[in-house]
Amino acid sequence: MTLEHKNVQDGKYHVFPKGFLWGAATSSHQVEGDNIHNDWWEWEQTGKVKESSGKACEHWTRFHEDFKLAKSLHHNSHRFSIEWSRIEPHEGEFSEAAISHYRQMIQSLRSVGLEPIITLHHFTLPLWLAKEGGWLSNRSPQLFGRYAQKVAESLGEGIRYWMTINEPEVYIFKSYLTGEWPPGEKAPEKVYKVASHLLKAHVFAYDAIQDTFQKLNRPPTQVGIAKHVAVFSPCSSSLWDRISVWLRNLMFNHLFIKALIKGRIFYPGFFRIQLPRMKTLDFIGLNYYTRDFVANKGFRTPGVFGDVCTSKHHSDVGKKNFLSWEIYPKGLFLLVKDFSRYHLPILISENGICTEHDEERWQFIHDHLKHLAKAIEEGAPVIGYLYWSLLDNFEWAEGFAPQFGLVEVDYKTQGRKIRPSAKAYAQVCKTGLLLKED
Ligand code: BGC
């Protein structure tokens, strides 16, 4: 018996389930480079953000090298997104060249033994659709469904996991409330329509993928959504703060999932969205980063959802990352337990830290995995963990400064350097074991 086996028997390790998906995630616009046909590219050209994505990590041409790095780190899966604006650069015209390029990427993943997990929409829109109003356009859900069908037909063979839309509510928040992202609107009155179209788009994509798989007699596939989740804590014990926390949790964590399970949704404010059909989720992807303290001084702060409290008396609560988000590993336990109520498999589709101090990254991963393991030990149906991100990359409005990568990227030379944290994480990926008192 090896020492490792003995230690497992002695209960010194958290043991992750067999077949667990281990890996990292990326998204097209953040790593590929030269995504000139989407709304983000145009937004960058008008100087609305600090930096332009430009060549990003040149992942479009360097993907094989990057996937080999991931494999050397014992990952067995990789989440990446397909860029709609490359597949369909002009309305109704699908680019065979782009399709064939993504086919090569999928083959490359398989050739090194990584399970491809495909995201269909990760914040960017083809320019032609953006010009028509983007997700405000009544045609957007159908158009997304048609794109999903094309991808499922031409690239879907053997794909086991799909994520239709990445973080719909973050998209709505940044694009239609704070105006930091394209189309740069501050228009609460438009939120209902955008939300309803995003939800319908998911349903159309779900149907397109599942119907294509059935028609082509392919083995079953699973379609989910990548849901941004946060822990909300009351700033004080006041009733108002607790009401706001409860509402935020419902609104920002659960509402979209409930909608996709029930086929309908009631928004506070008495809007009702009816989806074309019920239960269009085979698994739930959770993207988890941080916790927010919520303060509400009656109706003096913005509405019943309160306001994020950044006051000093919370500063000792936990360390913060480079972007000042609190690091709260226990939150992963709490959220995974909470989402277990849906009795669907849960994939941690993003969890990560941006930091200039790599030792903080391994601490972050370790502490989050410890809490994830506890949730699994208590019966949570978790199927995998994907660190955000494989590479340092273009962090949207924040530009290239935040370093999320397991692998450092030198943007001048496009050189890659594996960070020590990546090697520590690799040990867990390799063995499925996490030392308890580490
Ligand atoms: C997004 C990524 C982003 C990451 C870090 C997630 O919400 O899906 O695109 O880079 O957070 O901000």
Image (cartoon, rainbow, N blue to C red):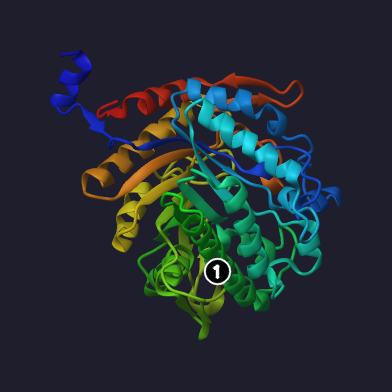
Residue at far left of view: 10
Q: Which residue is mark 1?
A: 199
Residue drawn at x 69%, y 39% as measured from the top left: 100
Q: Amino acid at mark 1?
A: Leu
In front of the other: 329 or 107: 107
Task: Please identify the quarter of the rendering in which residue 376 is found.
Answer: top left
Residue drawn at x 37%, y 48% as measured from the top left: 332
In the image: residue 204, left or right of residue 293: right
Please say if 245 is above or below 326.
Answer: below
Quadrant location of the C terminus in the rendered image: top left
Q: Residues within 10 Å of mark 1 (few under 14, many from 20)?
A: many
Q: Position of residue 326 (x, y in %)?
A: 48, 46
Residue drawn at x 62%, y 48% as measured from the top left: 154
Please say if 356 is above or below 94.
Answer: above
Please say if 145 is above or below 374.
Answer: below
Q: Position of residue 193 (x, y in %)?
A: 63, 76
Q: Position of residue 21 (x, y in %)?
A: 39, 38
Quadrant location of the N terminus in the rendered image: top left
Residue drawn at x 76%, y 63% as measured from the top left: 129
In front of the other: 411 or 281: 281
Q: Is residue 128 visible?
A: yes
Please say if 47 is above or below 427.
Answer: below
Residue at far top of view: 2
